[in-house]
Image (tube, rainbow, N blue to C red):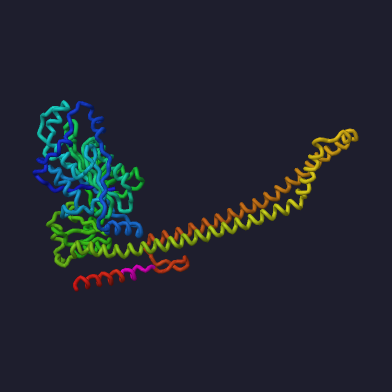
């Protein structure tokens, strides 16, 4: 999970916009927690549509198939600068970059501690609360002394590693914990999820003014608090992605200064002495030095742009430019072109991955079908053997004949005639019945023992079959995992696979694109 922030655009007149009378909350002397909890909203607003998430697909493919991490240090805590305009913040977070007419990058949004469930109206409620800070303080019995809050807008974002797939519930839960950590769980806020990055992430816009007491939230040392929050989150979830944060934590514990830097960029800089060597060292780690919109940037393998100077301790911008004097900066690739190439590579890798998954699924299903057939044949085999053994053993021990004799003797001894009792024949028949029952019991015991031996043979053979099938499944799973980790999409025929058709499909897509382009020109 990554914590980061973006500076929202500002509109000076945003606070002048007032919501309708229905949104104005009455004053109350009730406790802060109970009053805030009573107006908590948990409704969701989901946005549909949107362009394909190419960057995220690329990152997931790279992380899963190649077995590499997103970055050496994937979690960088950054908090947005305080802002005055809730309208400006919502125009930025609730719409696409560079325009307010579309909102394709917004996946869903949720309001917290507001009467409205519409995020488009939430900024008006938050702006009104901030404007009414003095009246809220007076109504709740707080002192009105002190300077008026100038920047009521506080925003941050929480991002997860590309190989992580948190669901909406988990993302909301984490955002709530972050708000609680900052002491803002009772403040008005809006949680917005975006899908325009390789990793899943949410933005949280918070009103620093408490909706009941009017007091401003304390945001001092917020960077350290969020860094510790992210560190604890990684430890609780069982995997540490950012070793740099652990090192910075140890430094802070010792009273030393700590600063984040990308180890790849820092190592490339420290191990080289000229611009070309720096570029080659970055290329060895699949990083690219490119021309950004305003400055030189380093693009990592997942399409994230970095200002290299910020990752180099003690290096200023002029020192960085001086090191690159031996190369022609105009010949450096454009950052947007680098991203486009990554997109093309992502499409090919994604197609290959899908074909690989399909073929692997077919092989697994074929193995399951074969193993089910083997188990079915074993069951049929012993079902027939069991039936034959029952018939054979019953005839061997004369069970049907003895059973018939017992029934006749029981019937004869139930109501003997006075003549049989007088002559002693009734007593003789009872003794004969007792003896026949003992013989039948002994024979039936041996009959059951014979059937148990058949059952034991079945259990032993079933255990052997189960162990062999389990070994086959483990072998196939190990093979597929090894191929996926190595990024090898050419599966050998000894596992029943065929060659992937990624290149063929790519050519077909290019041909279709070329035809569409020609049709548009006509």
Q: Residue at x 84, y 35 (%)?
A: 416
Residue 246 vs residue 187, the one in the foreground: 187
Q: Position of residue 298 (x, y in %)?
A: 21, 59
Q: The C terminus appears in which quarter of the rendering?
A: bottom left
Residue 342 vs residue 439, the one in the foreground: 439
Asked if residue 123 lies in the magenta stretch, the reply is no
Q: Measured along the vertical axis of the image, is residue 297 above or below residue 124? A: below
Q: Position of residue 82 (x, y in %)?
A: 15, 43
Q: Residue at x 65, y 56 (%)?
A: 384
Q: Position of residue 320 (x, y in %)?
A: 15, 58
Q: Quadrant of residue 508?
A: bottom left
Magenta segment boundaries in residue numbering: 500-506
Q: Residue at x 73, y 52 (%)?
A: 393
Q: In this view of the protein, can residue 289 be seen by the observer?
A: yes
Residue sitting at the far right: 423
Q: Residue at x 32, y 44 (%)?
A: 169
Asked if residue 504 lies in the magenta stretch, the reply is yes
Residue 68 vs residue 187, the one in the foreground: 187
Q: Quadrant of residue 130?
A: top left
Residue 407 falls left or right of residue 10? right
Q: Measured along the vertical axis of the image, is residue 357 above or below residue 15? A: below
Q: How many marks?
A: 0
- Dominant secondary-structure state across the stretch colored magenta: helix
Residue 356 vs residue 108, the one in the foreground: 108
Residue 44 falls left or right of residue 147? right
């Amino acid at each position: 999970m990554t914590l980061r922030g973006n500076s929202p655009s500002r509109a000076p007149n945003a606070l002048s916009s007032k919501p309708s009378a229905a949104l104005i909350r009455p004053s109350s002397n009730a406790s802060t927690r109970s009053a805030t909890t009573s107006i908590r909203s948990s409704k969701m607003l989901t946005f549909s549509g949107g362009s394909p998430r190419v960057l995220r697909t690329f990152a997931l493919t790279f992380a899963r198939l190649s077995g590499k991490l997103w970055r050496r240090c994937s979690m960088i805590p950054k908090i947005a600068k305080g802002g005055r305009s809730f309208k400006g913040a919502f125009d930025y977070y609730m719409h696409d970059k560079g325009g307010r007419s579309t909102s394709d990058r917004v996946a869903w949004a949720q309001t917290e501690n507001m009467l409205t469930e519409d995020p488009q109206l939430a900024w008006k409620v938050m702006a009104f609360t901030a404007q009414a800070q003095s009246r809220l303080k007076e109504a709740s019995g707080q002192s009105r002394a002190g300077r008026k809050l100038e920047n009521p807008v506080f925003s941050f974002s929480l991002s997860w590693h590309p190989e992580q797939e948190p669901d909406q519930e988990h993302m909301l839960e984490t955002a709530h914990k972050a708000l609680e950590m900052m002491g803002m769980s009772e403040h008005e806020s809006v949680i917005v999820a975006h899908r325009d990055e390789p990793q899943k992430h949410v933005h949280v816009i918070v009103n620093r003014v408490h909706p009941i007491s009017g007091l401003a939230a304390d945001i001092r040392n917020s960077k350290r608090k969020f860094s510790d929050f992210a560190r604890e989150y990684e430890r609780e979830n069982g995997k540490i992605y950012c070793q740099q944060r652990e090192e910075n934590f140890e430094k802070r514990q010792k009273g030393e200064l700590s600063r984040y830097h990308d180890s790849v960029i820092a190592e490339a800089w420290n191990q080289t002495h000229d611009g070309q060597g720096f570029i080659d060292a970055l290329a060895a780690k699949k990083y690219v030095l490119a021309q950004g919109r305003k400055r030189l940037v380093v693009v990592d393998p997942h399409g994230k742009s970095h200002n290299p100077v910020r990752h180099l301790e003690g290096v200023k911008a002029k020192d960085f430019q001086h090191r690159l004097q031996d190369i022609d900066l105009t010949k450096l690739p454009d950052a947007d072109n680098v991203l486009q190439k990554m997109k093309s590579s992502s499409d090919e890798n994604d197609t290959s991955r899908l074909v690989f998954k399909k073929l692997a699924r077919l092989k697994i299903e074929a193995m399951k079908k074969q193993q089910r057939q083997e188990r079915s044949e074993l069951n049929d085999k012993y079902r027939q053997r069991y039936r034959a053994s029952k018939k054979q053993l019953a005839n061997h021990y004369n069970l049907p004949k003895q059973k018939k004799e017992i029934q006749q003797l029981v019937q004869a001894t139930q109501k003997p005639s006075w003549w049989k009792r007088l002559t002693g024949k009734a007593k003789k028949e009872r003794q004969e019945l007792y003896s026949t029952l003992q013989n039948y019991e002994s024979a039936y015991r041996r009959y059951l023992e014979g059937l148990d031996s058949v059952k034991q043979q079945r259990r032993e053979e079933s255990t052997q079959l189960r162990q062999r099938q389990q070994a086959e499944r483990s072998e196939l799973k190990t093979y597929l995992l090894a191929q996926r980790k190595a990024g090898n999409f050419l599966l050998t025929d000894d596992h029943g696979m065929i060659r992937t058709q990624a290149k063929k499909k790519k050519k077909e897509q290019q041909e279709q694109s070329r035809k569409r382009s020609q049709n548009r020109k006509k």
